Amino acid sequence: MYFTTDPKGTPTLPFYKTMLCLICVMILIVNGVSLVHNLASLKGANELQSRTARVIDRVQYLNVLMMDAESSLRGYFLSGSEVYLGPLRTAEKDTAPLLADLDELLVEHPSQRKNLAQLRTLVERKLAGMGQALAVYRAGGLGDIVKIAETSDSGSAMDEIGLQVVIMVQEQNELLAGRSAAFYAQYQNAAMLGVLINVAAILVIVLFYRLIRSSFVARVATQRALVNANENLETTVAMRTEQLSVLSRHLISVSEEEKARLARELHDELGANLTSINMDLNAVCDRLRGREPALAAMLDRARATLVGTVELKRRIVENLRPSLLDNLGLEAALNSYCAEFGSVTRLDCELLVEGELDDAGPMQAIAVFRIVQEALNNIAKYAQAGTVIVHLARAPAGLSLEISDDGVGIDVDAASKPKSHGLLGMRERAMLLGGYFKVGRGVNGVGTCVEAFIPLPAQATSPHVELAAAPLRAAEGLV
């Protein structure tokens, strides 16, 4: 089952599939939050490392400035050249900006700010001492400087500065190491969380894959079952249709055989009996005409009724099996029927025949005649036509029949309606002999046109046993 339905009947996903979708979304959200947090932590660690490196660089640079300043002052004392005072001037100029920069970098570290204050005091004291020594040298010369050096502690001041620098560098390294360890631990936790998230995502993807695969397999199986069912249904329908068609054709053949048999019996036996009765009545009537006029008149009325009965028998026999069809051929039978149809219905019914029809077998002839008979009956009932044209032509492979009228026309789907027995019967008659049948609108959409093709025995594609239609014997005096 791919879907469930809500109370309104709308298809919805099953609950477990919905939960899997929500879990997958939550995993993606957690993964995104963790990624943002890790990026923030990484940025903080990078900033801390950069700040620590800047602090160490500036502290060490300050130490180097002080050492270079002291060395340059000693070189000036020994040589008296002003060139040696360059590092001292640089130290006096750069010390204040360096200390201000360090003060800004260490604003979040109170302990380091205390160390920085001590370093500032030592540096300022050292610079002041070097300034005083320079002034003494310029005033009293090298001897006064020697005396000051013997009594001063300038060397210990530089050692204190160096020691303070070492302390600050060490604290920065320790702070960096602590922050790095914390970041590494946090990174490990984030990595583990990421692994867990990935594992969960993989599990959800595997579950989705299995669901999709099972759904796909079930759908393919359903489609295959549906295709097989359709194929079986089509095969069954085709088989049933063929069976019904065969049965219909068999019934038509049986019906024609039965009609021929019944027509022969009516013509032979009933015709002979009626002829015998007529002869007896004539004989009796001739003897009684002079002696019993009243009885002779009654016999004359009986003879008139007998003649009507003979005519009724003739019409029944002709409807069952046209005697002209067996005695004079298809063209004569159609001419007679079309003429009778026109006189009865008062329609202009015209028959056009092209080619020789003598080679048409009994089955082909009766099929053409029955199609014409049924088509003309339909025209008389439904078409509201004034003119009917029956066109029969001898084609190279068989008989081509076309019946057209100028009536109201026929619906295009009339032939497929269940109650269209007449049209279905005409089609089955044509198909019985391997031909075809179709019905549609006439020329320019006016009226109805019925077309049929009946192969002759040599070209027929569906051979059947032809009806054994013996010629009907004409009854003397009754036709």
Image (tube, grey):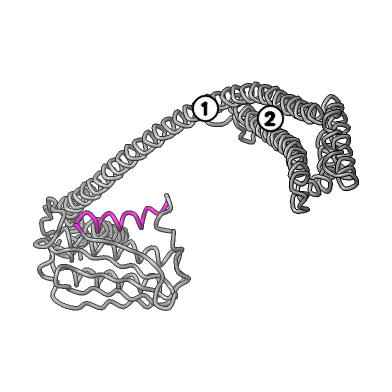
Residue 275, position as x, y percentages in the image: 17, 57
Q: Which quadrant holds residue 59?
A: top right
Q: Which residue is mark 2?
A: 7
Decide which of 28, 413 is in the foreground and name it.
Answer: 28
Whether residue 297 can be seen here: no
The residue mark sitting in front, 2 or 1, is 1
Q: Give, as a three-letter code, the residue at label 2.
A: Pro
Decide which of 82, 9 is in the foreground and name it.
Answer: 82
Stretch of the chain drawn in magenta: 419-434
Does the magenta stretch mainly form a helix, a strand or a loop? helix
Residue 465, position as x, y percentages in the image: 12, 50
The residue tagged with tag 1: helix, strand or loop? helix
Residue 417, position as x, y percentages in the image: 43, 53
Q: How many marks?
A: 2
Vertical comparison of 447 with 153: above or below: below
Q: Give, as a three-letter code, the residue at label 1.
A: Ile
Position of 119 with respect to 452 (left or right) is: right
Vertical comparison of 105 with 315: above or below: above
Position of 351 with respect to 3 (left or right) is: left
Decide which of 403, 303 is in the foreground and name it.
Answer: 403
Q: Which quadrant holds residue 31?
A: top right
- Residue at image x 85%, y 31%? 122
- Residue at image x 34%, y 36%? 228
Whether residue 394 can be seen here: yes
The residue tagged with tag 2: helix, strand or loop? loop
Q: Which mark is residue 202?
A: 1
Decide which of 259, 272 is in the foreground and name it.
Answer: 259
Residue 326, position as x, y percentages in the image: 14, 63
Residue 277 part of the magenta segment: no
Between the C-alphas of marks 2 and 1, the distance is 35 Å
Position of 205 with respect to 353 (left or right) is: right
